[in-house]
Every structure is written in C-alpha cells, then in structure tokens.
Image (cartoon, rainbow, N blue to C red):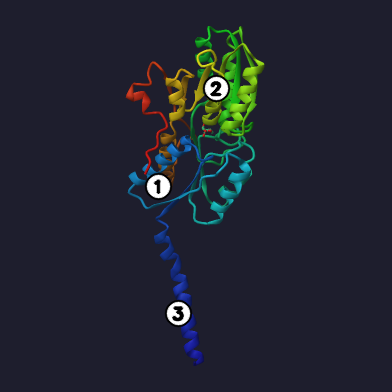
Amino acid sequence: MSKKFVVVLLSLVMMMLLALPMTTSAQDDTIVIGFLPGVVDPFYQLMEVGVRQAVEDSSLDIELVVQIPEMFSPTVQTPILDAMVARGDLDYLIIAATDKEQMVAPLQAAFDAGIEIISVDTFIGDGDYVNGPVTFPLSYIGSDNTEGGRIAARALAANVGEEGKVYIQNVNPGISTTDQRQQGFEEGIAEFPNMEVVGVDFNGDDESTAVQQTEAVLQREEDLVGIFGTNVFSANGAGIAVNNAGLAGAVDVIAFDATIFAAEQLRAGVVSMMIAQKPFDMGYLAVQFAIADHQGVTSLPKRVPTGFAVITADNIDDPEVARFIYEVAEN
Ligand code: T6T
C-alpha cells in the first residue's frame, strides 16, 4: 500500500468521523424517558399505565425505559437508578424516590449526568423545589399527602363520635408520602380533645407484617376504635387483622389508596373510607412535562398536586367515583 494511499484513506476516515455528529443529531430527536417507580403494587401499576398512555398519545419519537424494583427501599432503588444513568442515553427520569434523604445524592448524580428529573408521588428534600434544600428536579407531581392524612383523621373522628383511641399502620420513616400522611393524621386527630393516637408501627411495606403488628395492637388496646392504614399494604394488613379478630364495624379502618382488595373490604364493612390517589394522572402528566421541557417550555410548575377521590359506601357504586379504584386491565 503506497504512503499516499494511506494518507488519503486516513483523511477519508477523519472526514467520516467529523460527519458523525450530524448523523447522531438526527437520532437525537428520540426522547428517552426512564420510569422508576417505588415497587410493584397496584398504585404504581396504574401510574405506569398513565406513563404508557401519554407516550402512545404523543406523535413524538419517545423511547421508554421502565424498571420496577421488587422492594420499596432506597437500597434496592439506588443501583437500579445508577444502572439507568450508566446507559448514557436517558434524557428524562420519572421517579418515585423511596426515601426523601437517601435518594438525593444518587438523583443529584443522575442530574449531573444530564438527566432531567421529574418526581412523581414522592419527593426528595422537603418537596419545595423552588426554595427548599433540593431544587434540581423539574417538578414534583403527586398528592397533597398531609391533607390526605387530615381527611382520614376527620372522617375517622366523625365515624367514632369524636372520641377514643386510634392507631397508625405505616410503611417506613423517611418516605415523603407516608411521613406526611402520618403527620396530617396526627394533626387531624389533635383537633379532637377526646381522641388519642396510641401508636404507630412500620411494616416495611409488607402486608403480613402489617397484619401481625395490627393483631398485637388489637390485643393490647381492647378499646381501640380506629386504624389509619397509610398505603396499600398497611391498609390491607390492618383490614385483614380487624376482620380476623371479628372486629369489623367495631374498629373503623380508613385506607389510604383504593385497591380492588380495599374496595372489597369497604363493601364488607371492614373499611369505611378509601382515599384514592390519581396515579394514572401522575404518570401521564410526568411524560407530558418531559415532552414540554424537551420542546423548550420554560414555565412548567415545580409542584402539581393531583387531588383525591374520597370513596365510601355512599358513593362506591357511582361510576364517576368507582373509576378511581386502582384497576389495571390484564393483557
Ligand atoms: O401509597 C402509594 C404511594 O403513594 C406511596 O408513596 C407508597 O405506597 C403506595 O405505592 C401504595 O402501596
């Protein structure tokens, strides 16, 4: 091979390499969106339906990367997040952080790697992405959980004649949503001088632990009048324990979240109220926010409360209300 030929060949290769960025910029029209919820449960399943629907409804080229942790825990969620970041192609990450402090550093690293973060359901820091300690996420889309806790307390108080001992079944300290639900519930119960919160247990998002803990409390506190279950597994466990003890109707259960199981318990008189969140809307809106940001919209709100549907025996048969029960069609 002549020297001249090698030089020409090398020049050609260089020209091709220089031309490469143009090729990749054409491929860059694809928006890559990651979705990393808290765990496998009916709430996040419905959120995923919302995410997928928003992608389907968009005419843009969107690639969705979905990873669902087996356990609700920052120890499980962090390596999954790190692996999503390591792919190197994510533009946006829609995440329900499993701990408001422990997930800050891994999410900061994701943001520093060029990924825009959208919080759904849970927040990091104190949730104030304008003035709080953490401001890098694009937005926080989710329920007003403190208000949800207050709704539960006031409903429970009304059901039990505004007096008596109540108990809280909770998940883990450090989760923004369930911390705020507990706080709102305690504030709400404090409005009633003849009511008292006699305890809180943390079940680690495990239904059978919730059953065991509730059974122990029912034995210890014979005059207990009510229980607040702060999420799916907490409320399910509380309801099962009350039912097993033959105390349906005597110990009132307020369920945060509106699963099919909780709806059955409501119809059976074990649960008196379900506080349904809007997980579909959270997922749908989050994708729309990613798209809007990608298209240059700069006025996206940093906080979007998504509201509740409060479901009781009085309205569960109203289709306009029942549609908020977390039902995911099987494929
Ligand atoms: O209650 C939801 C969610 O809002 C919370 O952050 C974690 O638990 C659920 O996913 C229900 O299991």
Q: Circle 1: is it few (<14), some (14-19), or many (20+) Cα within 10 Å?
A: few
Query: In the displayed structure, does residue 289 sit left or right of residue 233?
Result: left
* Nearest the eye: 156 or 189: 156
**Could you tell me the amino acid type at mark 3?**
Leu
- Residue 162 location (% of width, % of height): 55, 8
- Residue 121 location (% of width, % of height): 51, 34
Q: Circle 3: is it few (<14), some (14-19), or many (20+) Cα within 10 Å?
A: few
Query: Element under label 3?
Result: helix
Q: Which residue is the site of mark 3?
A: 12
Q: Give me the disc on residue 318.
A: none
| Quadrant of the rendering where the C terminus is positioned | top left
The first of marks 3 and 2 along the sequence is 3
Q: Which residue is the site of mark 1?
A: 295
The first of marks 2 and 1 along the sequence is 2
| Residue at 57% across, 49% down | 80
The first of marks 3 and 1 along the sequence is 3
Q: CA distance from mark 2 to mark 1?
A: 54 Å
**Could you tell me the amino acid type at mark 1?**
Gln
